[in-house]
């Protein structure tokens, strides 16, 4: 019976783990035995009081308090030609009731709806006594919860005519709090769960920590979670062999530093950190950078990536989908090649790949526009005197089809064609004429002065060189002949 109740509570409240909800103990009335959780819920189910039970459970689950950033916007401002400040402040929202001292608190068996109205209190660090919104019953015009999974929501009140904008909240806590506010708006009997509203203590705001730096094992938190409001987290020299899954719940995280650990593999769920801009994985044991991360929300958010001092031999072709990257550090790895489509990283300004095993650079590398470039200590090869000819005459059906798909930009995916064909299309080479080739091509090598793509260039070797070999591909003999001057 308890499991059935718990599932119904889960559907009503939106809490992710109904099994973790505390069993309601009920209110003890003098002279009567204390009611048990499951029996009390079974009785309420039979008498139609389930919504009140949900409210009791919410009180246990979320404590009727929410820590987040709040901005209260008056809807009268546009009519007066004014604008709101546009920036939220750290606050603690409390849901409770104001009980006058002269009136006793209603008994548990009293008449429903005869208690005191539910109030909303918003306290900030500067105003710990807070702003009180006295009446919630039938006073909420609309809930805006489209981005509730990102910790954002808005509650629009009728009187006063204000929008209470919430952001940077823990998504699970936000869902539970909003469910309680909805029940108060509908006039449900939630007062059994609520306490009298009191000013917030300064210690409550210590939870609003935005930066945490941990540089030793002894300081690493094992028994408690990271503050959900963190925007910058550094856990270096902690001996981590994998990414702590608790970090992946920090939806406000913008900078994550996991340097100087022993991490061998990255979970794909790092891509769920939609605000992540800087990721430092320097000095770990990584052997690859997964395709799933390249195709995640990091495409739109990631600006800086440090993969130095790992064991990475190659980056996937999909790595070039991280088109917001501005800084990329790949020093001291085992790289033997760059992705063919490296030139798609249009925003890249800082590239360091010193002390690797790069024999040459891809032809699209010429499309980059860098401010700083470091290729010192790589094993660049001398350009080959003769081209490598891999032309097919006539073209195979696979080659012809692949060229047609790529040239006409026909969408494809593993739900349309086999996965291995998708991989072939992803790794197709680009001819200097702009067309594509799969297995039929001519490969030629030339030398490029790195100053043509970067303002500041670290010397390639101890001899003072700033040139590197670039491999180019040609889809036909005609393209190769027309480009002979370039190769020379």
Image (tube, grey):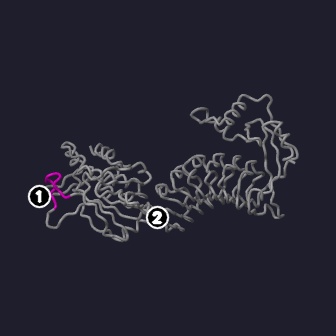
- The dot on residue 365 is none
Residue 446 in picture, x, y percent from top left: 83, 49
Residue drawn at (59%, 35%) of the image: 414
Say whether residue 73 is visible.
Answer: no
Q: Which residue is mark 1?
A: 31
Residue 469 higher or lower than 430, as above or below: below
Which mark is first along the chain, 1 or 2?
A: 1
Of residue 78 and residue 436, the one placed in the foreground of this image is 78
Residue 200 in picture, x, y percent from top left: 32, 68
- Magenta range: 105-116
Q: Which residue is mark 2?
A: 221
**Residue 108 counted in the magenta span:** yes
Q: Quadrant of the N terminus?
A: top left
Residue 102 higher or lower than 116, as above or below: below
Residue 87 is left or right of residue 459, and the answer is: left
**Residue 333 counted in the magenta span:** no
Residue 298 in picture, x, y percent from top left: 56, 52
Residue 236 is left or right of residue 209, and the answer is: right
Q: Secondary structure at mark 2?
A: loop
Residue drawn at (54%, 56%) of the image: 242
Residue 81 is left or right of residue 307, and the answer is: left
Of residue 266 and residue 175, the one placed in the foreground of this image is 175
Residue 71 in picture, x, y percent from top left: 39, 61
Q: Main secondary structure of the magenta part?
A: loop
Residue drawn at (49%, 57%) of the image: 247
């Amino acid at each position: 019976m308890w499991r059935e109740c718990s599932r119904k509570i889960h559907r009503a409240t939106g809490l992710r783990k109904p099994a973790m909800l505390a069993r309601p103990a009920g209110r003890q009335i003098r002279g009567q035995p204390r009611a048990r959780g499951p029996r009390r819920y079974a009785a309420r189910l039979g008498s139609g009081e389930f919504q009140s039970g949900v409210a009791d459970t919410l009180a246990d689950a979320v404590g009727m308090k929410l820590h987040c950033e709040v901005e209260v916007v008056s809807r009268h401002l546009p009519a007066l030609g004014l604008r709101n400040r546009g920036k939220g402040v750290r606050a603690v929202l409390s849901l409770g009731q104001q009980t006058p001292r002269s009136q006793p608190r209603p008994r548990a068996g009293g008449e429903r709806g005869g208690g005191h109205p539910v109030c909303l209190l918003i306290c900030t660090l500067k105003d710990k006594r807070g702003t009180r919104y006295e009446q919630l019953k039938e006073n909420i015009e609309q809930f805006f919860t489209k981005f509730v999974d990102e910790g954002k929501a808005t509650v629009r009140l009728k009187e006063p005519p204000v929008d209470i904008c919430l952001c940077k909240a823990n998504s699970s806590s936000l869902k539970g709090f909003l469910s309680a506010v909805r029940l108060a708006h509908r006039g449900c009997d939630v007062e059994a769960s609520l306490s009298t509203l009191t000013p917030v203590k300064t210690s409550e705001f210590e939870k609003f920590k935005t930066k945490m730096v941990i540089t030793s094992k002894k300081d690493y938190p094992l028994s408690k979670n990271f503050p959900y409001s963190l925007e910058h987290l550094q856990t270096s020299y902690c001996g981590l062999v994998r990414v702590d899954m608790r970090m992946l719940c920090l939806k406000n995280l913008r900078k994550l530093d996991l340097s100087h650990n022993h991490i061998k593999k990255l979970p794909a769920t790092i891509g769920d950190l939609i605000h992540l801009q800087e990721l430092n994985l320097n000095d770990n044991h990584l052997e690859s950078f997964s395709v799933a991360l390249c195709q995640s929300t990091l495409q739109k958010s990631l600006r800086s990536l440090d993969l130095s001092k790992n064991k990475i031999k190659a980056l996937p072709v999909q790595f070039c989908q991280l088109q917001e990257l501005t800084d990329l550090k790949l020093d001291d790895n085992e790289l033997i090649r760059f992705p063919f489509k490296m030139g798609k990283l249009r925003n890249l300004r800082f590239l360091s790949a010193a002390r690797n095993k790069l024999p040459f650079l891809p032809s699209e590398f010429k499309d980059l526009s860098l401010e700083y470039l470091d290729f010192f200590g790589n094993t660049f090869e001398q350009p080959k005197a003769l081209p490598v000819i891999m032309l097919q005459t006539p073209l195979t059906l696979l080659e012809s089809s692949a060229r047609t798909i790529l040239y006409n930009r026909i969408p494809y995916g593993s739900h349309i064609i086999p996965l291995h064909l998708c991989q072939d299309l992803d790794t197709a080479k680009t001819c200097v004429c702009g067309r594509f080739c799969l297995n039929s091509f001519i490969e030629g090598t030339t030398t490029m002065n790195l100053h043509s793509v970067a303002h500041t260039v670290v010397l390639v070797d101890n001899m003072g060189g700033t040139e590197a070999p670039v491999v180019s591909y040609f889809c036909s003999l005609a393209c190769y002949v027309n480009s002979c001057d370039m190769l020379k």
